[in-house]
Amino acid sequence: MSQMKSVQTAGTNQVDVVDVDRPVPGPKDALVRIRACGVCGTDVAFLHMGGMPARAHLGGDLVPIPLGHEPAGEVVEVGADVTGLKAGDRVVVNPQAAPTGIIGCGGRYGGMSEYLLIENAEVGTSVAVFPDTVPFDVASLNEPMAVARHAVNRSQAKPTDKVVVLGAGPIGLGAAIWLKLRGVEHVVVVDIIPSRLEKALAVGADAVLDSAEEDVTARLTELHGEAANALGQPRPGTDIYIDAAGAAAVFNTVVDNAKWHAKLVMVAVHKKGSDIDLGGMLRSELTLVPSQGYPTEIFEVTPDLVEHQSRFAQLISHRVPFTEVERAYALALTPGAAEKVVVTFDDVAE
């Protein structure tokens, strides 16, 4: 049986590039040669843990897991029962559709591999085809941009709403793009890293705010006007906040600034519990809207990603060849070292 290289966890903050058997597609499956795969914050979380607890192991032993849930590639083989797909099609993948577990998140297969088996391959469910006018690295943004799109969909933002995105990582910047494409007239992006704020303006944000250097309340009041909470206390006129940062200080900044009937969409994963000012939420009747994954958005975003690819391409800060994949994860593990890292497979032999 032919072999291929695949990346998996190898203890705390370490990866291994291992040789594994190349999957063989069954009648309902497709085999995809990976051409690009993004590195996600979820990958970093798995690396911090050193793997994933094995349910079958007493004592919570950790087992290595294949990494990579943001792949894009080219179909090289399809099973006899597969329809709508053929060799040569360029595809993005729904990691959550795999029956043997989420691709790159504890399932049998990971997208940071030379080849990926698409089980029960079905266009519109497990894969979507994209044209050859879109580079594979940009196509690999499909999955994280679906996460960002779901947050914006959950916000139900209207064109007249004043929106603040907190956190200018890939999800926050993606949310800013989707908000502008949705027709929202004024979008502010907040972060503490100047280069990320510059990127926010480049992808279409109307204003940015450096919360390490500026008074958040004063700046938002300047941008969005003055309103009040339920007790009549002055607050910025921001209608919707999207938390793409995942820090307790960010969450509480929203509570401190929320006007009456403001909305907070939480898409970031908060790694630690935090003390929340419930009284502050009460005083503004702040609506908290959690946003998890992409129930319907995974391929809803694909046509727009194709149409606006030049804007989304700006989110990629580092393109690292697969032969240097350890460096890609090292960048992702270093706070502030990279915005979006995409591993490319152009250097891998056929």
Image (cartoon, grey):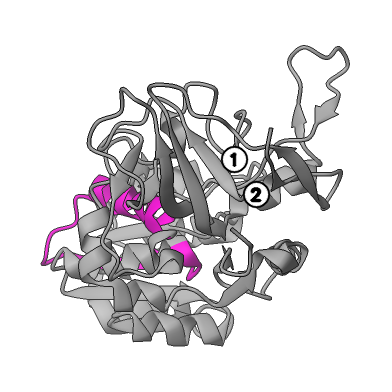
Residue behind mark 1: 104
Relative height, residue 85 to residue 142 (above, below): above
What residue lies at 46% left-to-right and 67% top-to-bottom?
Answer: 137
Tell me, yes or no, whether the highlighted magenta stretch contains residue 22: no
- Give the residue drawn at x 29%, y 69%: 177
Question: Which quadrant holds residue 200?
Answer: bottom left
Q: Secondary structure at mark 2?
A: helix
Q: Is residue 268 found left or right of 80 in the rendered image?
A: right
Q: Residues within 10 Å of mark 1 (few under 14, many from 20)?
A: many
Measured as percent of width and height from the top left, residue 291 is found at: 38, 42
Task: Check if mark 2's residue and mark 1's residue have beta carbons within 8 Å.
Answer: yes
Identity, as a three-letter code, of the amino acid under mark 1: Gly
Which residues are the magenta region?
141-170
**Label 1 element class:** loop
- Per the image, the residue denoted by label 2 is 43
Does residue 33 appear anywhere in the picture?
A: yes
In the picture, the quarter occupied by the C terminus is bottom right
State whether residue 192 is above or below residue 328.
below
Q: Nearer the viewer, mark 2 or mark 1?
A: 1
Q: Residue at x 16, y 74 (%)?
A: 185
